[in-house]
Image (cartoon, grey):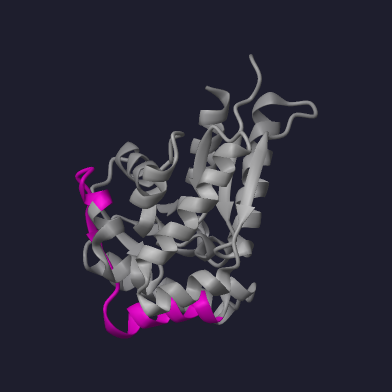
Amino acid sequence: MGELRRIGLLGGMSWESSALYYRLVNEQVRDRLGGFHSARLVMASVDFAEVEAMQAAGDWERAGALLAAEARGLEAAGAECVVLCTNTMHKVADAIEAAVDIPLLHLADVTADAVRAAGLDRVALLGTRFTMEQPFYADRLRSHGIDVLVPEGDDLALVHDVIYGELVLGVVRDESRAAYGDVVRRLVERGAQGVVLGCTEIELLIGPGDVEVPVFATTALHATAAVDFALS
């Protein structure tokens, strides 16, 4: 095997989930190559307070410009791909892709491949309000032939509020885990065959043992895709 290709992690949204990306990528390189191997990485970590303010204001153009500039910095530092360590900010994926000459490993494409490989064609999508209500993520999944269901009403508000009120702050509560389980159960009753954890922080709260259908942990899937790239 030749030298590992260098992965560029664009994180900080939140740093809690970015830390998970860093650990998962390095664990996979270690497990696949053995010995003292670890990943060749460069990371840009933004101030999430700035990004969250842009989200709340609906200023996606400025957010896209910010992340595009960070991606250019990763490329200049030797990154050979960009891994955007957040589901929600894939809303500005086009701006990032246009700013660099290296590939962006799109999280929704990676997730869709896993859903299709599992033989499913209808999944529930949990994430921030932006990810659940706006079409940028669900439509990308649908482009792969996957039907997407999202929570409604109070359930949608609960999923979003737990992310921003607890998980991005590193708070993990059993009560919230149970509440998420109830949300997933109602989505299964509507026909969901599996659930996409479409926010990186959700993986801090629930996993395959917490719900009755297959779980697609987007952070873990994205990390695997990044390591596949690094080893290719």
With 65 as the anchor, is 232 left or right in this view?
Answer: right
Q: Position of residue 189 (x, y in %)?
A: 25, 68
Q: Is residue 182 visible?
A: yes
Counting labels gives: 0
Q: 96 or 34: nearer the eye? A: 96
In this rendering, the answer to whether 144 lies above or below 29 is below
Quarter in which the N terminus is drawn: top right
Q: Main secondary structure of the magenta part?
A: helix
Q: Position of residue 13 (x, y in %)?
A: 55, 63
With 8 as the anchor, is 102 left or right in this view?
Answer: left
Q: Residue at x 41, y 65 (%)?
A: 62
Residue bounds of the magenta highlight? 140-165
Q: Is residue 179 magenta?
A: no
Q: 6 or 187: nearer the eye? A: 6
Q: Position of residue 217 (x, y in %)?
A: 47, 53
Q: Residue at x 74, y 29 (%)?
A: 37
Q: 32 or 137: nearer the eye? A: 137
Point out the residue furthest to the bottom here: 154
Point out the residue furthest to the top here: 1
Q: Can you tell which quarter of the image residue 19 is in?
A: bottom right
In this rendering, the answer to whether 143 lies above or below 67 is above
In this rendering, the answer to whether 77 lies above or below 207 is above
Point out the residue furthest to the right here: 36
With 205 as the anchor, is 116 left or right in this view?
Answer: left
Q: Position of residue 203 (x, y in %)?
A: 53, 60
Q: Residue at x 54, y 72 (%)?
A: 50
Q: Is residue 198 visible?
A: no
Q: Is residue 148 magenta?
A: yes
